[in-house]
Image (tube, rainbow, N blue to C red):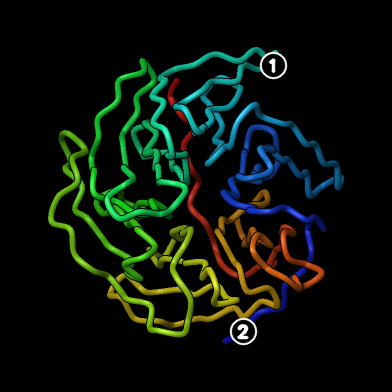
């Protein structure tokens, strides 16, 4: 089954990533990692903003009470509603940068890192709480990417892109620990690499395919049941947005392409394609 996409924002982001719906402002947040830019888009008015960061930014999420949390090259930063910036946790590692991140049901941030050269075991996945406490959950990651939770919060889905797998963990009800890692689904050779993901209200996992020019949906049992082909090869991430969370926003990239498609680096949207789950803000 296929669906028609629209262009939400025509752009030339080098590495567009991390679409996130902010219900408090009614805006879609997204980033250009290598361009060091945070973008916002208001679908009701078409208004856009762009803010430059001082270093490469891997993810941006809303904070409870206003402002943003940023997964930056050198750690986790907080942007207050008045525009003031401060570090929540700083951890500079030469050759390493931030990548995708997601807010867990308890309001903590699951922040990923990777080496610029994508070396095996060079990245991490860490849990960051609002007081700045950091716990490394995975220390053997190559390219830490999509992270999301089932609607009931009992499962966590995760992608380390070079593995070509979408993995799933059990989540402890009392302490939120992730255990029992196993594969939900694998991307076959020639179909690209799994990148960002989001989970819908039916518990299905939507996955963007880097080099695959598509977004796929997998059922909770791991069956592929939907494919949305797109004209750009480097599809990076997806998230539901809009007032009813029924529109799927998709980020794309153009980095490394010698003859990029005119829409490479743009923010795309597939209207009315499903139903998302409200995402909590970062509790910090």
User: Residue 83 — which label?
Assistant: 1
* Position in image of residue 69 (x %, y %): 53, 28
| Towards the viewer: 38 or 250 | 38
Sequence order check: which comes first, mark 2 or mark 1?
2
Q: Secondary structure at mark 2?
A: loop
* Helix, strand or loop status at disc 1: loop
- Which quadrant would the N terminus be assigned to in this image? bottom right
Residue 55 sits in quarter: top right
Q: CA distance from mark 2 to mark 1?
A: 41 Å
Q: In this figure, which residue is indicated by the disc labeled 2?
A: 2
Query: Camera-side residue: 51 or 41?
Result: 51
Q: Position of residue 155 (x, y in %)?
A: 26, 54
Q: Tell me the residue at 53%/40% (across/down).
A: 59
* Residue nearest the viewer, comparing 238 with 210: 210
* Res 147 seen here: no
User: Pointer 1: residues within 10 angstroms few (<14), some, or many (20+)?
Assistant: few
Q: Position of residue 75 (x, y in %)?
A: 44, 27
Give the residue at x 51% y 24%. 64
Q: Is residue 168 above or below residue 178?
A: below
Drawn side of residue 91 relative to residue 156, left or right: right
Residue under the image location 67 percent in, 51 percent down:
242
Location of the C terminus by quadrant is: top left
Q: Is 235 above or below relative to 75?
A: below
Q: Is residue 276 visible?
A: yes
Residue at 35%, 28% in the rendered image: 128
Could you say which quadrant of the image residue 275 lies in?
Answer: bottom right
How many numbered markers are drawn? 2
Location of residue 283 with respect to 3 vertically, above or below: above
Tell me the crowding category of disc 2: few under 14, some 14 to 19, or many 20 or more residues within 10 angstroms, Cα based. few
Q: Are marks 2 and 1 in contact (CB under 8 Å)?
A: no
Residue 72 at x, y percent in the picture: 51, 32
């Amino acid at each position: 089954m296929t669906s028609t996409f629209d262009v939400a924002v025509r752009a030339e982001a080098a590495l567009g990533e991390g679409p996130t719906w902010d219900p408090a402002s009614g805006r879609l947040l997204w980033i250009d990692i290598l361009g060091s830019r945070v973008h916002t888009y208001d679908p009701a008015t078409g208004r856009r903003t762009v803010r430059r960061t001082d270093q490469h930014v891997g993810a941006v999420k809303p904070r409870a009470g206003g402002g943003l949390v940023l997964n930056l090259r050198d750690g986790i930063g907080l942007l207050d509603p008045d525009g003031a910036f401060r570090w929540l946790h700083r951890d500079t590692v030469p050759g390493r940068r931030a990548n995708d991140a997601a807010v867990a049901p308890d309001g903590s941030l699951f922040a990923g890192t990777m080496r610029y050269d994508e070396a095996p075991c060079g990245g991490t996945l860490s849990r960051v709480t609002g007081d700045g406490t950091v716990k490394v959950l995975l220390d053997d990651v190559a390219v830490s990417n999509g992270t999301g939770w089932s609607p009931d919060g009992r499962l966590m889905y995760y992608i380390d892109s070079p593995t070509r797998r979408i993995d799933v963990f059990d989540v402890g009800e009392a302490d939120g620990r992730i255990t029992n890692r196993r594969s939900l689904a694998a991307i076959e050779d020639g179909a690209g690499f799994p990148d960002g993901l989001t989970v819908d209200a039916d518990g299905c996992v939507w996955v963007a395919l880097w080099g695959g020019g598509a977004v796929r949906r997998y059922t909770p049992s791991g069956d592929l049941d939907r494919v949305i082909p797109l004209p750009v090869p480097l599809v990076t991430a997806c998230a539901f947005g809009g007032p009813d969370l029924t529109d799927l926003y998709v980020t794309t990239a153009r980095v490394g392409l010698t003859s990029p498609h005119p829409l490479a680096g743009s923010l795309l949207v597939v209207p009315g394609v499903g139903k998302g789950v409200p995402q909590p803000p970062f509790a910090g």
